[in-house]
Image: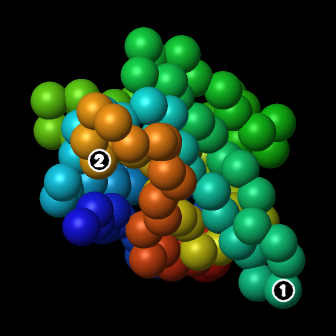
Amino acid sequence: QVQLVESGGGLVQPGGSLTLSCAISGRIFSINVMGWYRQPPGKQRELVARITSGGSATYADSVKGRSTISRDNAKNTVYLQMDSLKPEDTAVYYCNADIRVAWNTNWGGYWGQGTQVTVSS
């Protein structure tokens, strides 16, 4: 069984910063792309940032320049540092990863349970 557990969410003032973490555990053979998505209140889930196993990162235009995604392959953990936070960054943030649980299985998409980020004064 594979588990993705996010942490680091909370209440932040506008202009503040926070770092989200997502630790992956369980039966894992290989992890490919890891990413962060978010779902603002009343809206659809959207991509925030993603990073390949080689470290190549892409960002949504809405967070580009004020967010950094990184990963620690030894710890099976992905991070999202967000700076200059805005009220419109308020959302539930979800971790996602493409994982193979064994050498002879296909890649599967796995999700964490989500962590709330609220940007408000």
Judge by depth and name the residue closer to the eye, 98 or 4.
Answer: 98
Figure quadrant of residue 65: top right
Give the residue at the far bottom of this rendering: 42
Name the residue at 54% across, 16% down: 56
1 horizontally vs 91: left or right: left
Quarter of the image where the C terminus is located: bottom right
Name the residue at 76% across, 58% down: 46
Q: Is residue 77 visible?
A: no
Figure quadrant of residue 9: bottom left
Whether 28 is drawn above or below 89: the answer is: above
Q: Provide the residue designation for mark 2.
A: 101
Residue 26 is situated, as x and y percent measured from the top left of the image, at: 17, 59
Name the residue at 62% across, 40% down: 49
| Kind of residue at badge 1 | Gly
Give the residue at the far front of this rendering: 104
Judge by depth and name the residue closer to the eye, 44 or 106.
Answer: 106
Residue 97 is situated, as x and y percent measured from the top left of the image, at: 46, 47
Q: Residues within 10 Å of mark 2 (few under 14, many from 20)?
A: some
Q: Do the residues under discs 2 and 1 have CB atoms within 8 angstroms?
A: no
83 horizontally vs 38: left or right: left
63 horizontally vs 43: left or right: left
Q: Provide the residue designation for mark 1.
A: 42
Q: Is residue 110 visible?
A: yes
| Badge count | 2
87 horizontally vs 94: left or right: right
Residue 12 is situated, as x and y percent measured from the top left of the image, at: 49, 69
Name the residue at 82% across, 72% down: 44
| Kind of residue at badge 2 | Val
Distance of mark 2 from mark 1, alpha carbons?
A: 34 Å
Quarter of the image where the N terminus is located: bottom left
